[in-house]
Image (cartoon, rainbow, N blue to C red):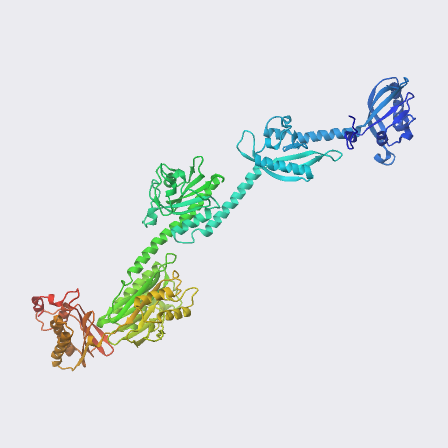
Amino acid sequence: MWQSSPPGSVYDYIRLASFSLGADGLVEQWSRRAEELFGICARDVVGRDPVQVFLPEHHRARGHHEVAEILDGKEWTGLVPFRMPDSAAGAGGAEGMAEIYVMPSETATGERGALCLVVDVTALRRIETDLAASQAIFGQSPFGFLLFGTDLTVQRTNRRFATVFGGAAEDHRGRTVHDYLARPEADRVADALARVLATGESITDIQITGTEPGSTERRHWSVNLYRVHSGSGRPVGVAGLATDVTRRHRAAREAADARRNLALLNEAGARIGNSLDLETTARELLDVAVPGFCDLASVDLYQGLLTGDEAPPGVTDGSAELRRVAFASAVSDAPLAAPGCVGPGEDPAEVTVGSVHRYPFGTPCAKALRTGRARAVHADDGELVHSTLAVPMVAHDTVIGLVQFSRTKGSESFGERDRALATELASRAAVCMDNARLYRREHERALILQRSLLPPGDPEAAGLDIACRYLPGNTATEVGGDWFDVIELPGHRTALVVGDVMGRGLRAAVAMGELRTAVRTLALLDLEPAEVLSALDEIARGLGTPSGAQHASRAAHKSRDADLSEVYLATCVYAVYDPVTRRCTFANAGHLPPIVVEPGEEPLLLDVPPGMPLGVGGEPFEEVEVELSEGSLLALYTDGLVESREHPLDEGLHDLRTAMSGPVRPLEDVCDHVLTTLDTRHGEDDIALLMARIQGLPAEAVGDWRLPREPRSVGRARELARAQLVSWDLEDLVDTTELLVSELVTNALRYGEGEIRLRLLRDRTLVCEVWDAGLVQPRRRRARDTDEGGRGLQLVGLLSAAWGARRTPRGKTVWFELPLPDGESRTPAELSVEQLLSMY
């Protein structure tokens, strides 16, 4: 079937023309393409000599010769110069070069002629050059090139493509993308080819992943697709240019990994170690690692580390007991341990958080613990976890535990970069955990020291119902210097003390212990409250200096601007309660004021002069004496109960008074109610609370007499003491009491001054007091065999449970104490007559 040549055919590119010559050598026919090539219309050339028409003048002689030979029946091919049309060569024209193929011909009548085919040599050479250049670029390009036909099968490939996928370039003709790529990728590329062919819109930088024949390495290509047209504009297929960007992908992935690793390390630095708790630090590590670095992870610490052993196990054989302290997973149904780190027949699911376990000697986890180096754990086919790193936690060259990082199927296996990152993460966490371990040890020691310096629970005192609470700061805070004490004084009096050393830590706790010991010592000297605080202030100023309080005092006088970094400051309130008079004397050194709740009244802050804190020095302390009603409630406390960062002091004091108001309740219930009602923000500071309900000695428990200063008062004192003990049903103590009362009254007559006062007090013990106006304190001495006296106080010391003397505003008081018959102390009746007689 004949078909006309479509526009834009190959003849348009090679500029082909034709004309014919008659037997006379003149142009007989002139084609339209000849008109275009030579720029001469048919009417201007038909019937004319072609040599005269388009050959340059200096070529015409040779042209006539060639035409004559052609008309003789010879074929001729040659290059013929011609004058180019003015439109192509500019004004005046120029010479072109045509390749002419002349074929002799005959008419039906036998006349000879010639058919001439003309090709523009310039256009032909340009085509040859373009083809050669295209072939060189196509064949020598380092990029893979494919030409797909309209049926999306390969029509042509270049050498580079064939080198990658095997065979010769011709072997790939007729293949499809499914012959090179896996189905998901092939379907995606086929859709792109169809879209480009249909729309004519190019697609650039399609990222394709696949493998080369005979290799398992994943390769990455960037492909550009564009539609190819014929000279007439008809689509003839789709061209694809593929560039291997595997190195670029690898570099980009490494850069991304580096950025991810840096981000993980930055996050680790910000999130790990914010707590001084081992378990919390372990969870912080896993929060960073999962899922940013792995799919699941666990942390095991040596059991000895958690139980407070002095020295952690270090590098052992790796089989010591460990406790699972943290586990995290980003996938469901994940095992709790790497399968390669359990022994034969052991179930990884049994290793739960809190469980204690061992790693068998030959497992990678045991090897990691033993050597202190990370180990890879390989899983069997079919297991969910396919890659695990067992990384020892090393702090200060000591292995304290193991962390396992695991990745499940679908994630890339761990590489060397991952191993280095895992080691760094574990190392950072290990240092934080070791610091937490050291802090925990020191913190526990400080707590033990602090609690050992506090009085035992349920202290007792005459005429007082006492309840106390002490809440140390939690494990997230340091030990503080809060303390309280209940000290029994002579005459059934009681000293109540609450104090707070400013600052925290072991040094504050030690300073608290020294101050508490000093308070007890000063209290036993039976000094007035203001005198106790003055002496305590001198002691506090000497705590921070190696040479004691005197050195601190001298240094303070030398320079008021001296460095106070080593000076310990403390606040303290000291109160002495007398159950006979129900009077309480207060002295305050910068502490919060006591609170008193009278029966039926609202809680009241006592107006006690605050004074300066202990350790400042230079200021005297004042005393305030208050008479308390029967059933009154007295509260001493530290600032941790009423003040916090978000709780102003005024609000805290108001809330404390509110909590102490209301109906009368048991004292223990009042303490619990106060602590549960107030927003104490416990953990910011220690809390000490000391409450006392006033229960004065009843009148029938007190015997009080005044005796004139005369010898017969000794006998009168014995009679009064005997009668009082009989009324109290204490006949077992009559003889001893008479004897000791006689000794004390006799001494008051001999060495004292003024009126004599005898007082007997019965509570948990029996106390006898003899008062006089003399200021000279009695002194016990050892009498010689020849001495007639000097044995009275020795007798008092032997027969009494305790004795002593104290100053009073108007003289002195000498006292002794006897246990009641049902007490556990030694009774005077156990002394033999021989022991008593030997003293005289």
- Please state, as top left, top right, bottom left or bottom right, where the C terminus lies in the image: bottom left
Residue 568 seen in the current view? no
Q: Image quadrant of residue 665?
A: bottom left
Q: Is residue 252 above or below residue 4?
A: below
Q: Image quadrant of residue 703?
A: bottom left
Q: Is residue 766 above or below residue 225?
A: below
Q: Image quadrant of residue 603?
A: bottom left
- Place of residue 429 in the rendered image (x, y in percent of width and height, measured from the top left): 42, 48
- Place of residue 799 in the rendered image (x, y in percent of width and height, measured from the top left): 14, 68
628 or 193, which is in the foreground?
193
Residue 596 seen in the current view? yes
- Please state, as top left, top right, bottom left or bottom right, where the N terminus lies in the image: top right
Q: How many numbered marks, from 0 up?
A: 0
Q: Is residue 807 left or right of residue 164?
A: left
- Place of residue 311 in the rendered image (x, y in percent of width and height, measured from the top left): 32, 48
569 or 771, which is in the foreground?
771
- Place of residue 351 in the rendered image (x, y in percent of width and height, measured from the top left): 37, 43
**Residue at horizontal 67 percent and vertical 34 percent from the top:** 239
561 or 483, which is in the foreground?
483
Q: Is residue 36 above or below residue 790?
A: above
